[in-house]
Image (cartoon, rainbow, N blue to C red):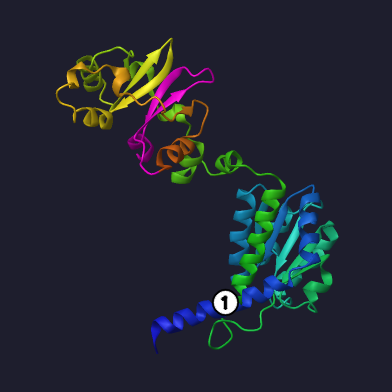
Amino acid sequence: MEIIARVKEVFQKEIDEVIKVRDRVGIEVEKCIRMILETKGKVVITGVGKSGHIGKKLAATFSSTGTLTIFMHSTEGLHGDLGMVHEDDLIIAISHSGNTEEVMSIMPSIKKIGCKVVAMTGNKESKLAKEADCVLDIGVEEEACSLNLAPTSSSTATLMMGDAIAITLMEIKKFMPEDFALYHPGGSLGRRLLLKVTDIMHKVEEIALCEEKEGIDSILLKMTNKNLGAACIIKDDKIVGIITEGDIRRALKNKEKFFEFEAKDIMTSTFKSVKDDAMAIEAMQIMEKGKSKIYQLPVIDNEGKLVGLVRLHDLVS
């Protein structure tokens, strides 16, 4: 067996089957999304086996993108977990065959509670489909497994159907990056989405501040003492330019006049800046955009007054 070729073949089989499922998407998916939007309670996803594993993932995706969702294992539902289900909830039951015993065993109780049911199944004529208020067709013709037994294409199709619904709901609800950050406070993702410029900037008292007519020797001394790699040029409490170590190196090419230079002669007056209420990720995007990176970025308020300085090094850290 050529291993790489076989791996690619499995990829292609699953891709082909998922495309077929995508091409069948129609009014039932829209109906499902509208049912979720109209649900006064929560969404409860249930299933067993591989469908259960996919269900857990989808419940997490729904929840993290603004749709209150929990996962209930169908077997546990038979032994008390149905107590977490209320009449205002919407059930999404996953079963590729549509006849999974554990899933069907909880249907009478779910109906008695009064919940509406969405079936995610590959069999539109199944028992589950007949019990459901809405049927999402996730049927595949062939699993990627050479025995056509192990859930592969079918589980991928289920996952993608659920993801598509979750993301569509997110966009309909106008779920914003700040909302996403609220549900992801931990780790690098949370830091990236929650961190503000003011959380990491160096305050004014830490910055080398110079006037337009200040001499190069004074500028160098202040930059050395503050050690941020830049000096901000101030006029009437507002920043009018910035001098970086790169500007100093360029000025050194004119050795004869170097110590005659004033700040206004070598500063960059068309500098980029970021507002003090911006997210840190916005500052990084500004610094990395363009032909060359910016390593120091002034932070200003709405009146153009300098309130801080952000370094690329601090953002990366």
Could you tell me which residue is drawn at 33 percent across and 37 percent down?
Answer: 313
Q: Where is residue 239 drawn, in percent x and y?
A: 42, 18
Above or below, 141 against 34 in this view is below
Quadrant (top left/top right/bottom left/bottom right) for the C terminus? top left
How many labels were placed on the picture? 1
How crowded pointer 1 is (Cα within 10 Å; few <14, some 14-19, many 20+) is rated as many
Residue 215 versus residue 62: which sits nearer the camera? 215
Q: Where is residue 219 drawn, in percent x and y?
A: 25, 18
Above or below, 222 against 28 in this view is above
Residue 85 versus residue 249: which sits nearer the camera? 249
Position of 142 compared to 248: left or right? right
Q: Is residue 49 visible?
A: no
Q: Where is residue 179 drawn, in percent x and y?
A: 61, 40
Residue 173 versus residue 82: which sits nearer the camera? 173
Position of 13 compared to 87: left or right? left
Which corner quadrant of the image does residue 243 belong to?
top left
Q: Which residue is mark 1?
A: 14
Q: Where is residue 256 drawn, in percent x and y?
A: 14, 23
Which corner quadrant of the image does residue 24 belong to?
bottom right
| Three-letter residue code for mark 1 | Glu
Q: Is residue 15 visible?
A: yes
Residue 286 covered by magenta stretch? no
Above or below, 179 against 138 in this view is above
Position of 49 compared to 226: left or right? right
Tag 1 secondary structure: helix
Residue 9 versus residue 250: which sits nearer the camera? 250
Above or below, 2 against 233 in this view is below
Residue closest to the far top: 236
Quadrant (top left/top right/bottom left/bottom right) for the N terminus? bottom left
* Range shown magenta: 291-317
